[in-house]
Amino acid sequence: MDLGLKGRKAIVCAASKGLGRGCAEALAREGVDVTICARGADALDATAKAIAAAGAKVTPVVCDVTTEAGRKALLAACPSPDILITNAGGPPPGDFKDFTLDDWRKAVEGNMITPIALIHATVYGMMERGFGRIVNITSQTVKAPIASLELSNGARLGLTGAVAVLARKAAARNVTINGILPGPFATDRLITNNQKAAEARKVPVSVIEAERVAAIPAGRYGSPAEFGAVVSFLCSVHAGYITGQNLLIDGGGFPAAV
Ligand code: NAP
């Protein structure tokens, strides 16, 4: 299927690795010019080169997207995107008892305020031009909270509520806003979380991995490539009637398998 995106411009946040990279690669394959960011220059440059090698136009921006200066740099590189994929590192796991107010402020800043700021800066231009696709990478925690991820549960639900009305307001101008809610995907983030869980329970990481995979009806972790392909479809010309949705992509893990 031709997604109708050739020549469009996209900002893909936090895209040197993992789910962001999967989205940038998939959009670039459709002929989209992609502006990607991350804090680490080496991995970002390597990703930009790999995507450009396949013939796409890629602009890497080294920045922390959760800061105002970072977002300014990103928007300066691509001031009028047709597509915005919001993303950032997720908050750390832990327990409510131990989180400080600063932990909460950081989580809200990174996973709620940052996407809101980027959406605010881009959505009205999209509406004027009559085309726009915004996809917020959130988490399955939006549908069902995860015990060790209370910071994530809170910040991502905040974002989901914050854009729910805007998603409807923008739809008449062919601008959509959707959330995509990953379950377990094979990325650095997942490996790190598994390691932390193994340390907390004093078991080998292979035990945690076996338990997690056993709980996924698909019997495996998702891949960043398949994640990117789904996001690309949500960004396509064919998806203008899908807005305000929060789409789980979790191998069937929710609701709990029978
Ligand atoms: P990942 O493999 O660790 O990749 C994270 C990417 O984001 C890297 O390119 C990283 O590069 C970049 N990044 C992180 N913080 C950034 C910042 N402040 N500014 C700019 N770039 C930043 O993580 P992932 O698994 O793709 O996860 C992406 C998001 O999806 C996270 O919010 C995560 O919580 C959420 N999620 C993931 C899963 C999963 O199973 N993987 C499930 C549910 C939700 P630098 O470190 O160099 O900046």
Image (cartoon, rainbow, N blue to C red):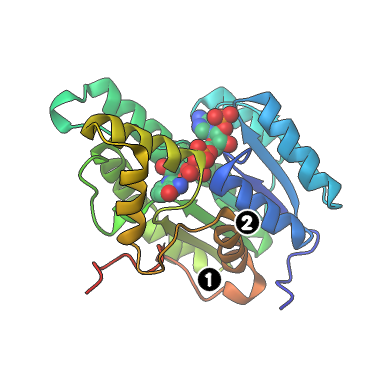
Question: Which comes sooner in the sequence, label 1 or label 2?
Answer: 2
Which residue is label 1 attached to? Answer: 172
Residue 217 is labelled as none
Name the image quarter holding the N terminus.
bottom right
Image quarter of residue 52: top right
Which residue is label 2 attached to? Answer: 126
For the residue pair 17 and 27, the one nearer the viewer reads as 17
Label 2 environment density (alpha carbons within 10 Å; few <14, some 14–19, many ≥20):
many
Is residue 253 at all visible to an observer of this figure? yes
Q: Exactly how many numbered labels are in the figure?
A: 2
Image point 61% across, 41% down: which residue?
15
Image point 69% across, 52% down: which residue?
25
SS type, badge 1:
loop
The x, y position of residue 105, in whole percent, is 31, 27
For the residue pair 95 and 32, the one nearer the viewer reads as 95
Above or below for 116 versus 101:
below
For the residue pair 14 and 254, the one nearer the viewer reads as 254
Image point 52% across, 76% down: which residue?
241
Image point 29% across, 29% down: which residue?
199
